[in-house]
Image (cartoon, rainbow, N blue to C red):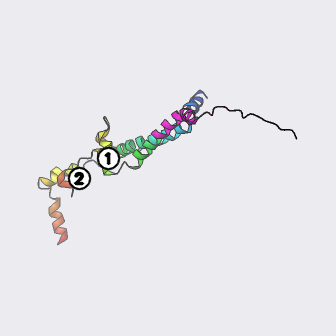
Amino acid sequence: MVFYNALRNILYKRNSVFVATVFTGAFVFQASFDVGVTKWYEYHNRGKLWKDIKPRILAGGDGAEDEDEEDDE
Amino acid sequence: MVYQASRIAYKSAPGALHVLKAYTPNLIFFGAAAGGLVFTLTERVPLFRNTFLKKIPVVGDHWDVKIDPQDTYY
């Protein structure tokens, strides 16, 4: 109850404070959500991403390119 | 007929400044809200990114996307 009273007095009592909290919160959230999802995605797909395989490809590949050429013919 | 002469009771109006003073905190917070909205909606706009977001002290690097020139057309 104390928590909700504090929440009301700090956040909801003044509409301008509430609106400002929502918009700045949205700004902070979209940036942090982006960071979080990107981190998870790159961890989940580690080893398959361009940044991981780029040095190998540029060094001449690991044979995968030759196989592709055969498939094309 | 009774002729009544009444005086007009003058009294000073509160004035716009008084009202403005009372609303100042609200106006400040609504200004911050408007700023937050602009930041939120223009986060992906390159001009806005380069002008403001990149220059935020600690977390500015998040919007400073570095792509190897080899990997992009631009």
Residue A25 at least partly seen: no
Point out residue B42 in the picture as x, y percentages from the top left corner: 38, 49
The type of residue carrying mark 1 is: Arg
Counting other residues with Cα less than 10 Å from the Cα at mark 1, is it few (<14), some (14-19), or many (20 or more)? some
Tell me the CA gap for discs 1 and 2.
Answer: 25 Å
Foreground: A31 or B45? B45
Q: Is residue B43 above or below residue B7?
A: below
Where residue B3 sits, quadrant-wise, is top right
Question: Where the N terminus of chain B falls, by quadrant?
Answer: top right
Q: A71 above or below A64?
A: below
Residue A40 picture location, percent across and down: 34, 45
| Residue A22 appears in view | yes
Residue B72 x, y percent position in the rendering = 21, 56
Q: Which quadrant would residue B14 be assigned to in this image?
A: top right
Q: Amino acid at mark 2?
A: Trp
Q: Which residue is found at the position 40% from the left and 45% from the top?
A: B39
Give the mark count. Answer: 2
Look at mark 1 in the image and give the residue it sits on. B49
Q: What residue range appears in magenta? A: B4-32
Question: What residue sits 32% from the left and 38% below the top?
Answer: B56
Residue shown at 41%/40% (left/top)? A28
Q: Is residue B5 magenta?
A: yes
- Secondary structure of residue under mark 1: helix
Secondary structure beneath label 2: helix
Question: Badge 2 sits on which subunit?
Answer: A
